[in-house]
Image (cartoon, grey):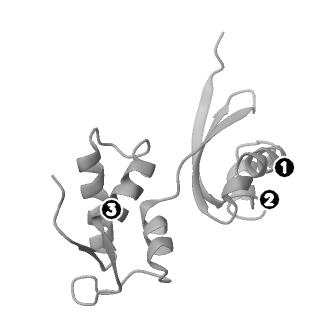
Amino acid sequence: MAKEIAGFIKLQIKGGAANPSPPVGPALGSKGLNIMDFCKQFNARTQEKAGKVLPVVITYYADKSFTFIVKNPPVAIQLLELTNVKSGSAEPNRKKVAEVTWEQVKGIATDKMSDLNCFTAEAAMKMVAGTARSMGITVKGETPN
């Protein structure tokens, strides 16, 4: 018989760097879950992506056990890494901070496709381009069709 799901916890943790300090400790401790067990499993599963911010969805069950899914880094983080800027623009409509090409946008879109709520690569590219635009990053070139 399947376990009864008690709830979900969504966190963003750096790969290979989960520890019992906030935000991990309080989020898991308030649900009565084993914090160190999660930290060891997460760090083992994400050591090849060390230092990158990774979203994780933890499903916890009524018997205090859990499973978790590690997703790809957020689009905004990938754009910042790609352009080597520290943060997006405070005024994205007036002050631009960087430029990316449509090929770079396509690379991020294909990497993030499993986590996005779209069905085609073109729609994923539009979502990534929209995120870039809202961060003050210009997308160069013609829109590929």
Which residue is located at x 29 percent, y 42 percent?
Answer: 118
Which residue lies under the disc numbered 3? 103
Which residue is located at x 37 percent, y 53 percent?
Answer: 109
| Residue contact at pointers 1 and 3, CB within 8 angstroms | no
Rendering coords of residue 41 (x, y %) = 78, 44
Task: For the N terminus, give its image quadrant.
Answer: top right
Q: Which amino acid type corresponds to the residue marked 1 in the rendered image?
A: Met
- Distance Cα–Cα, label 1 vs label 3: 41 Å
Which residue is located at x 79 percent, y 60 percent?
Answer: 19
Q: Which amino acid type corresponds to the residue marked 2 in the rendered image?
A: Pro
Rendering coords of residue 44 (x, y %) = 78, 47
* Mark positioned earlier in the residue sequence (1 or 2): 2
Whether residue 85 sits left or right of residue 91 in the image: it is: right
Which residue lies under the disc numbered 1? 36
Up-down relation of residue 70 to residue 25 (above or below) = above
Q: Which amino acid type corresponds to the residue marked 3 in the rendered image?
A: Glu
**Element at badge 2?**
loop
- Distance Cα–Cα, label 1 vs label 2: 7 Å
Which residue is located at x 17 percent, y 62 percent?
Answer: 143
- Distance Cα–Cα, label 2 vs label 3: 39 Å
Say few, some or many: other residues with alpha carbon within 10 Å of mark 3 (under 14 / 14 to 19 / 20 or more). Answer: some
Which residue lies under the disc numbered 2? 20
Whether residue 96 sits left or right of residue 45 in the image: it is: left
* Mark positioned earlier in the residue sequence (1 or 3): 1
**Element at badge 1?**
helix
Rendering coords of residue 71 (x, y %) = 54, 47
Answer with the quarter of the image where residue 137 lies: bottom left
| Residue contact at pointers 1 and 2, CB within 8 angstroms | yes
Whether residue 17 sits left or right of residue 117 in the image: it is: right
Whether residue 26 sits left or right of residue 116 in the image: it is: right
**Element at badge 3?**
helix
